[in-house]
Amino acid sequence: MGLNESFHLCCWGDYMNMRSTAIGVALAVTLGLAACSGQQSNQSAATQSADTSGQWRSHGRDDSEQRYVPLTQINADNVSQLGVAWFADLAERGGYQTTPVMADGRLYVTTPWSKVYAFDAKTGEQLWKYDPQVPRELAATSLCCNISNRGVAYWNGKVIWGTLDGRLVAADAKTGQKVWEAQTTDPELALSITGAPRIGDGKVFIGQAGAEFHQRGYLSAWDAETGQKLWHWWAVPGNPADGFEQPELEWAAKTWNGEWWKTGGGATPWDGIVYDPETGLVIFGTGNGAPWPAEVRSPGGGDNLFTSSIVALDAKTGQYRWHYQTVPADSFDFDNTSPLTTADLTIDGKKTHVVMQAPKNGVFYVIEAATGKVISANLFVPSANWLTGFDKDNNWKPILNPDANIGKTGKGWFVVPFQTHVWNPQSFNPETGLMYLPARYASYGMVSEAGAKMGNQLLSINVAKRPEYAPPQLEGAGMYLLAWDPVNQREAWKNREGSGGSGTMTTAGNLVFQGTGQRNFSAFRATDGQMLWSTETQGGGITAGSISYELDGTQYVAVVAGQGAGGGAPARLLVYSLDGKAQLPAAGPPVVPVLNPPANFGTAAQLARGQDLYTQNCTICHESGARMGNFPDLRYSAMLLAAPAFESVVLGGALSENGMVSFSKALNAEDVEAIRSHLVRVANELKANPPQQGGGRGGQGGGRGAAAAPSNAPQQPAAGLHQ
Ligand code: CA
């Protein structure tokens, strides 16, 4: 998982607002009308297949994962009349990344701790709830990024989903009773599932996260009826002395040097998977290599297959068919696990069945699904410095910039772009021919240091160090909703009122839906990007994708918003329709944080140790996270007042249901008191030097606009995250 994933997950609260927040207000609506140029001419996707019932029966609506809804009751002319049909509050605290699934009149959503709720999709009545009882202590030791879950799969009367401790669970869709359960990972290893399973041909496909915990990634397939394991495909070779489990691992091993198996290799496929019935392939993305700098994990070079790749396997057998490595020798956490979408495009006058992806590295790929032949690749942000071009004669292999090889040069590097598009869903509208993407144009500075850890994560990047030069000035930096024409590989429009961290959904009503701002849900005109409707959720931000479905003649739009910060509303499933009349409870007044630390205490050694431990264990959420959304700024915490209170949270797990789990496996009481001494000191420094107007935290929790972090804050590992 990414810095994103790794720099937001873990801890006290919701890492939600990865989305653009304060950026939004820029009125620049860059309306390129290229969307309507005669050159694009995509056919309606064959993959819409048999599902014409108005339901949303799988993670990406259907096998194509276009997230395109062929319904027109709600459209660009009347979307402003949308109202809340019903809503349901969700009690769990933590990051909400779930895309609902609607099948046979029931709506299924997942919540933190891998729980599932089922609702009547028309009335909102809660039908059942399932808690797989994930051990809470996992979060402190084995999760890079969050306690969230991105959604369920639906198959033949069963709801099937993954759990943080690596299980697949199948429950009866009507009753919520367990049908089967399968452990897909070795429970002794730090492997977790946050992604949604995909199902094709009666098989459940699932990957896992854990590259940063020196793991070896794989995709596995399970019988949807029985939970029996069918096949298993390793994404990187193990120790050659043990033999190779798959023939292709023998040549993949030639792209590695040293003893990479000792640190796992990475390549964990933790999100994007599509089953393609037209080719019989399951196509998925693999994670970054681990540890991060290529030179550290594979001294002397090598592409390190199959890290940072798109891989296609025969869905029936799990046998390798093709791969395209988007980033050979990745050093920048370029997981290639972003969503994948299949479609039939008309390219050079010929109908072509393609798979498309726009991953972290900033390049939009259009690839022939059957063969892996790259049709085109182009940057979807203004610039990049990790590559200098493509070797088109070699299936568009990227030409790497040698200066960016941080493990080899020994110098830090501000990579451009960074975290450009991570897991947040994309959508493709066959009518406009455009892909709708949350996009982020930013740089991030990394300094390689073999063996450097962040908590339990072996990154070999020193997260407390920045490169010794100024970050690049990026014209047009920021986060926005981007409409991309894949046939012509060019931007159709962008809208900075839109988000760079919230999923999209598009409809035949000429609409694109996306979460925007701090806590809004909005609709844009699909052809030109004009915002047509926006409503407050009263809670927190929306990072996942919305869905739309039809039931008894009414079209609905459903989305899950995270909990609000600082006393805001709980996380909430919101369902809208044109005649929706439900009223949301009034949002409470913003809670203004009070800075009231006790007197400074601690020896110089204790303070230094506290700062070090804080950097290692806490900054992931409470520095970068605080500025991104809902993570508490601990300088304001009342828990600082007394050692027992602070310890009850950090070691006792008193707030574990909020996502702040016990760190008792990583820290002892002495450590915790050292961390408290450090926090008390920085809180008192802040009190003595209050931030300038506009630089502090609002009651709704920072947001990106507060990027002017207080100058006396400790070194910010993720300071460049959003540039
Ligand atoms: Ca990663």
Image (cartoon, helix red, strand yellow):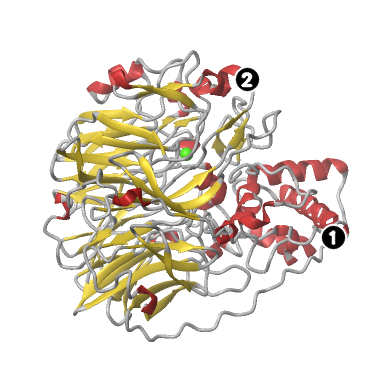
Query: Which residue type carries mark 1?
Result: Lys
Could you say which quadrant of the image residue 111 lies in? Answer: bottom left
Could you say which quadrant of the image residue 279 lies in? Answer: top left
On residue 298, the disc is none
Choose between 254 and 582: the one closer to the eye: 582
Left or right placement of residue 611 versus residue 451 in this view:
right
Mark 1 Cβ inside 8 Å of ligand 1: no
Picture residue at 17% right of the left edge, 65% below the top = 157
Q: Which residue is mark 1?
A: 687
Choose between 661 and 415: the one closer to the eye: 415
Choose between 50 and 635: the one closer to the eye: 50
Q: Secondary structure at mark 2?
A: loop
- The answer for how far apart the CA atoms under marks 2 and 1 are is 39 Å
Mark 2 Cβ inside 8 Å of ligand 1: no
On residue 410, the disc is 2
**CA neighbours of label 1 inside 10 A, class few (<14), some (14 to 19), many (20+):** some
Q: What is the number of callouts on the image?
A: 2
Please state the horizontal and vertical placement of residue 107, each as a whole percent of the image: 29, 70
Q: Secondary structure at mark 1?
A: helix
Picture residue at 50% right of the left edge, 34% below the top = 383
Query: Which residue type carries mark 2?
Result: Gly
Please state the horizontal and vertical placement of residue 525, each as a whole percent of the image: 36, 62
Of the two numbered discs 2 and 1 on the same chain, state the one appearing first in sequence: 2
